[in-house]
């Protein structure tokens, strides 16, 4: 393991994503598949780009952790994450619905992709490695950024760079009714970086091997 990654592992343990009490309902992936019709119009189209309230590609969620998906949906429902479309969808979901959708998307298309959770990622440039160490990113998201230390944290390796950049900016956004994420730890973290530095980290993370992908669907259900 290179020195940069060793430094990332040694970073102080900080919570770098929304960590709230996640839904406790038993997960049912088969039930989740039946409930995913509201999701596939965006997340089932490769590189689909949203236009409101900001322009960026909607995140990859097939292969994302079930607990994180349920936790994120709960945050949208509570208003802790501000996004008009996601808030409207999440508000219609029960705790069971969120658990089922998480279970479905965690395994969605897994048989068609190679698992890379234990893959050592390519070393970042020295300046980006310093930024990741400063943010202690590996202490929650894992040394390869694809195997978080807790299921409530997201996999971020291989995620779209424009989405990652938008998400990081959202943690530092205040007073905007349509954009923002309420998380004290992440808010404090992103405020120590310039926007160009946030973008540099997002650009690097997007290049890493990932378990996440898009499963194109032939029809809407």
Image (cartoon, helix red, strand yellow):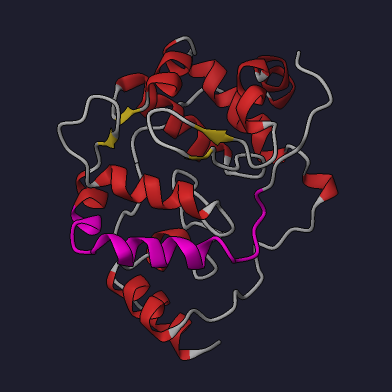
Residue depicted at x 49% and y 13%: 93
Boundaries of the magenta span: 188-212
Q: Give above or below for 106 relative to 12.
A: above
Tell me if residue 11 is in the magenta stretch.
no
Q: Position of residue 102 (x, y in %)?
A: 59, 31
Q: Quadrant of residue 131?
A: bottom left
| Viewer-proximal residue among 10 and 190 | 190
Residue furthest to the bottom in view is: 3
Tell me if residue 201 is in the magenta stretch.
yes
Q: Where is residue 206 in the image (x, y as percent from the top left)?
A: 55, 60
- Give left or right: position of 94 versus 196: right
Residue depicted at x 27% and y 45%: 171
Residue depicted at x 62% and y 75%: 120
Q: Where is residue 50 in the image (x, y as percent from the top left)?
A: 51, 32
Residue depicted at x 15% and y 32%: 175
- Give left or right: position of 28 versus 155: right
| Viewer-proximal residue among 32 and 170 | 170
**Residue 190 visible, this orientation:** yes
Q: Give above or below for 183 relative to 190.
A: above
**Residue 27 visible, this orientation:** no
Q: Give above or below for 213 relative to 175.
A: below
| Quarter of the image that includes the N terminus | bottom right
- Give left or right: position of 139 versus 105: left
């Amino acid at each position: 393991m290179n020195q940069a990654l060793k430094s990332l592992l040694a970073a102080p343990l900080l919570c770098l994503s929304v960590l709230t009490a996640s839904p406790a309902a038993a997960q049912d992936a088969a039930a989740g598949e039946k409930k995913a019709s509201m999701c596939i119009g965006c997340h089932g189209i490769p590189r689909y780009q949203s236009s409101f309230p900001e322009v960026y590609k909607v995140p990859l969620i097939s292969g994302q952790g079930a607990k994180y998906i349920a936790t994120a949906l709960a945050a949208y429902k509570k208003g802790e994450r501000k996004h008009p479309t996601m808030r409207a969808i999440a508000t219609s979901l029960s705790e069971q619905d969120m658990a089922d959708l998480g279970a479905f998307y965690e395994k969605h298309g897994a048989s068609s992709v190679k698992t890379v959770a234990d893959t050592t990622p390519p070393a970042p440039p020295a300046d980006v490695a310093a930024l990741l160490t400063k943010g202690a990113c590996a202490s929650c998201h894992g040394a390869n950024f694809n195997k978080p230390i807790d299921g409530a944290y997201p996999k971020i390796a291989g995620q779209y760079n424009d989405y990652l950049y938008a998400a990081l900016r959202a943690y530092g956004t205040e007073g905007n009714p349509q954009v923002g994420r309420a998380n004290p730890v992440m808010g404090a973290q992103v405020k120590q970086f310039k926007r160009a530095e946030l973008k540099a980290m997002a650009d690097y993370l997007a290049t890493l091997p990932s378990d996440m992908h898009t499963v194109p669907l032939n029809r809407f259900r």
